[in-house]
Amino acid sequence: MSGDDALVVPAGSGCVTLGGQTYCPIQIPTQPPGPCWFIDGVMHCAGQPVTCPAGSIGFPPYCTPILLLCPTGQTWCGSSGCANTQTDNSNCGTCGTKCSHGQTCKNGTCTCPDGQTSLNTNNDCGTCRTKCSHGQNCKNGTCTCPDGQTSLDTNNDCGTCETKCSHGQICNNGTCTCSDGQTSLSTLANCGTCGNSCTYVGSSCVNGSCGCESGYNQCGTSSVCCSPENASCNCCPGSQAICPTGGWCYFGCDRSNPGQCLTQLGSSGGGDVQC
């Protein structure tokens, strides 16, 4: 017999063996709610049209169960028909148990390609082949940092767990970033911290601090750098440099304050001029 064959058997019949294969009937209720009568050739019970349940023949209230035959090794799973619960992805182990998230049914168990049956491992987290990395571990099917965060786009876990953004940076797509989009804290615009700019000509950012390029002299403890050709320009701590008579000052002399050097380009008097 094929999987489509059926035998009509009396209600309450037990399993039968045919050709070395054992088949069992499904249980089907045979008594619909009454009273019942025909209307235009269709049986109605309690005022509603009714037919015998799937897996039975006849008309209510005279429904007779059908012995549904499934091949050896398969199980009758209702609307799914006959199913091999050892390999069927929709009926894995038991009828109605579906395999998903990349798993397939193997020996009655939903299994990932690497042989794992759990979706709570660092190699199969939530779905097969979803790997946890960057310091995360799988917890309840989700890659999670030790602080409980699942995102690697926070200021405490930026790109990797426990990588913290500081010095004015915020996490943007897994990278600590200043508001101008720069990720480095070794630039003239962001030296050591975001927004700390080295603005003077000849300045450089070294180890997160503003300094002077090679060949330039720092003016005391200020951030002003004296030009190489202006070694005679005496600098005082602070924002102004004192120009000796006849000396050259890189930013030029402040014509509104004779004897004072300008400390940045664009101020009045600018350019290399003799004091």
Image (cartoon, rainbow, N blue to C red):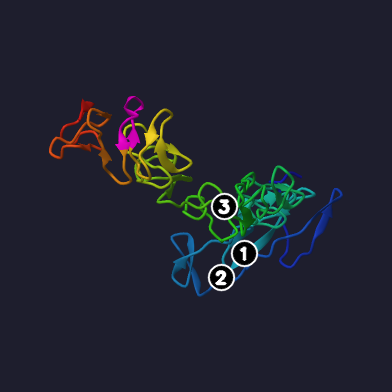
Residue that label 3 marks: 161
Query: Going by the image, does 10 lie left or right of 102?
Result: right
Closest to the observer: 240 or 207? 240
Residue that label 2 marks: 32
Looking at the image, can residue 103 be seen? yes
Of the two numbered discs 3 and 2 on the same chain, state the one appearing first in sequence. 2
Residue 29: x, y in percent?
A: 63, 68
Looking at the image, can residue 69 be seen? no
Of the two numbered discs 2 and 1 on the same chain, state the one appearing first in sequence. 2
Which amino acid, mark 1? Cys
- Which label belongs to residue 63? 1
- Mark 3 near mark 2, Cβ–Cβ under 8 Å? no
Query: Going by the image, does 230 lie left or right of 187?
Result: left
SS at mark 1 in the image: strand
| Residue drawn at the location 61% of the way across and 66% of the way down | 62
The magenta span reads 225-234
- Which label belongs to residue 261? none
Quadrant where the N terminus is found in the figure: top right
> In which quadrant of the rendered view does residue 264 lie?
top left
Residue occupying the far left of the picture: 256
Residue occupying the far right of the picture: 20
Q: CA distance from mark 3 to mark 2?
A: 63 Å
Of the two numbered discs 3 and 1 on the same chain, state the one appearing first in sequence. 1
Closest to the observer: 50 or 124? 124
Where is 186 relative to 246, above or below? below
